[in-house]
Amino acid sequence: MADSMYKVITLVGTSPTSWEEAASMAVETAGKNLRDLRIAEVVKLDMKVEGGKVMSYRARVTISFKYEGQN
């Protein structure tokens, strides 16, 4: 079995509804452009606030995917 290498990137997903939706948005968007996603970890949650009201939820997510360099 060959050794594997994974790359880890950080993304920020946003949602007007919830942190869960924001995290899902980050993962689903990454899945459209990256292959072989492995693990997603929510590392920070915050909110955009305007005029004392929550405008959007943000989730910072690290995602790992299999790295396939040139041979």
Image: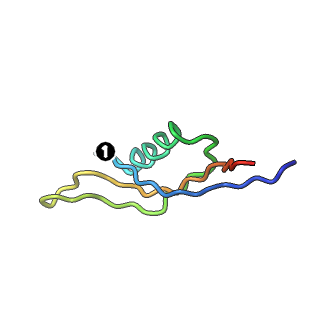
Q: Residue at x 68, y 50 (%)?
A: 69
Q: How many labels, in total? A: 1
Q: Residue at x 39, y 48 (%)?
A: 22
Q: Residue at x 43, y 58 (%)?
A: 60
Left or right of 67 in this view: 58: left
Vertically, is 52 above or below 28? below
Left or right of 64 in this view: 21: left
Q: Provide residue 36's location: percent of width, then percent of height.
A: 64, 42
* Of the pair 2 and 19, the residue shown nearer to us: 2
Callout 1 amino acid = Thr
Residue lying at the far left in this picture: please name it. Answer: 51
Residue lying at the far right in this picture: please name it. Answer: 1
Q: Provide residue 40's location: percent of width, then percent of height.
A: 56, 52
Question: Could you classify mark 1 by the number of other residues whose Cα lies within 10 Å: few (under 14), some (14-19), or many (20 or more)?
Answer: few
* Of the pair 31 and 70, the residue shown nearer to us: 70
Residue lying at the far top in this picture: please name it. Answer: 32
For label 1, the residue is: 17
Q: Give the color scheme: rainbow, by chain, secondary structure or one colour.
A: rainbow
Left or right of 64 in this view: 13: left
Circle 1 SS class: loop
Where, by quadrant of the figure, is residue 44 drawn? bottom left
Q: Provide residue 31's location: percent of width, then percent of height.
A: 53, 39
Q: Residue at x 67, y 48 (%)?
A: 66
Q: Provide residue 39's location: percent of width, then percent of height.
A: 61, 51
Vertically, is 21 above or below 60? above
